[in-house]
Image (cartoon, rainbow, N blue to C red):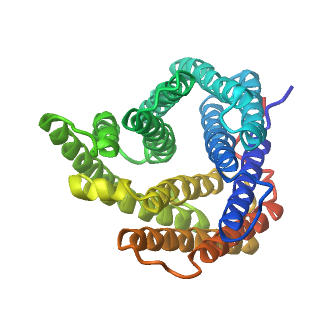
Amino acid sequence: MSLNLQRWIKISLINLLIVATLGVILRYKIAFSLPFIDQKHLLHGHSHFAFAGWISQAIMTLLVAYLSKQNPTARLRKYQWLLYGNLFTAYAMLIAFPVEGYGLFSIIFSTCSIFVSYIFMVIYWKDLNKLKENNPAHSWFKTAILLNSFSSLGAFALAIMMAAKIVHQNWYLAAEYFYLHFQYNGWFFFACMGLIVSKLSVIVSPEKLKRIFLLFAGAIAPAYFLSTLWMHIPVWVYILIVVAAFAQVFGWMYTIYLIKSNTTKLAFTPISKWLFIFSGIALSIKLLLQLGSTIPSLSTLAFGFRPIVIGYLHLVLLGVTTIFLLGYMFVINTFTISKTTAISAGIFIAGIIINEIFLMTQGVSALTYITIPFINEALLLAALIMFIGLLILITNLKLNTEDDFNHN
């Protein structure tokens, strides 16, 4: 049984198209009538599949691709079963959540998805240790898979509260934000940073790259409390939060400096370069928003309005993570790049930008209690633009026969 990594990347992209399709349906239901669909249940299916079916599936595939590149003789068949396992649980959740919401089967499959991540963590950690070269990216990868497993504590806490019928809003939100924080800012971010560091490590000294890792690794735990400033927290914890927010900004500024100083040596393709630029801009906005949220009054105001929270989450999931992963897929020579590829990627990015503008506009209008006409229709249009861009991109992708992957 062979492990075709290009095929797994294409599966991940198809899953992204499914996420976009669900996004269109959700936006259509808000703007117009769609009585046979339960909005809340479909939203749960949409979010769980986005995490497991798209982001986690893509990251796991790219991490295995890195392993293959570093050790061409490595046996990767064991990862075939893990990728299949993650894919199965993702599709099972895609079906279960829209049908029953948080019910027996959806909880079983989401729990199985977590167990797959545990197994992946153990196996991948061991395989990284077997590599002869200790690349600076390994620290990022190990932290990423560790935080992926750690985030599950939030999911289990939510499950326990639901099963015990404990209704406490602060505890519920704290558990939910715990899971989201260590997924977005842990698993997703550290994995993506590890991938870009694996490229930088060829031309940048390990000492410089280690500084960036220490800044972000040291900030990850205190940064969780950025999501809980609406709770009563000790002064010393608040000081740690502010330090963590500044540490992340400084770490990112130093990363930008290193990338900008070595742009010509990195030799990114034009489409990858532009995708990384947009992802970098989104990450810069995200880190500055986090820094601004250290002001308690602003944090309470922002987290009190759902459109702002949704806008922020989409900024990270789409603007930072998704655009980066697409850019990296082109960097590692996965697909043949054509004019259609560039145009479709541009359409997709335009949809993301339009979506963020309308979401933030909706959030600001909610703060001022001003109703903006046709905002839901505008968000539906943004979702359609993203869907069209992805559809064109995926249907026109051609595998590059001269790839960097080893097929075992």
Quarter of the picture holding the N terminus:
top right
Q: Position of residue 251 (x, y in %)?
A: 29, 49
Is residue 216 something one can see in this rendering? Answer: no
What residue is drawn where x is 64% and y is 49%?
A: 40
Within the image, what quadrant is residue 259 found in? bottom left
Is 78 situated above or below 102? above
- Give the percent coordinates (x, y) of residue 181: 43, 40
Task: Name above or below for residue 72 compared with residue 252.
Answer: above
Q: Residue furthest right?
A: 1
Asked if residue 219 lies left or right of residue 95, the reply is left
Q: Nearer the viewer, residue 251 or 387?
A: 387
* Residue at the far left in the pictured view: 235
Camera sees residue 156: yes
Q: Residue at x 66, y 30 (%)?
A: 110
Tell me if 203 is positioned left or right of 106 in this view: left
Residue toward you, 33 or 346: 33
Q: Tell me the quarter of the image containing the C terminus.
A: top right
Q: Nearer the viewer, residue 139 or 102?
A: 102
Q: At which x and y percent is residue 245?
A: 26, 48
Residue 12 in the figure: left or right of residue 199: right
Picture residue at 16% right of the left edge, 34% below the top: 234
Q: Position of residue 166 (x, y in %)?
A: 47, 26
Q: Horizontal placement of 100 versus 151: left or right? A: right
| Number of numbered discs | 0
228 and 389: which is toward the camera: 228
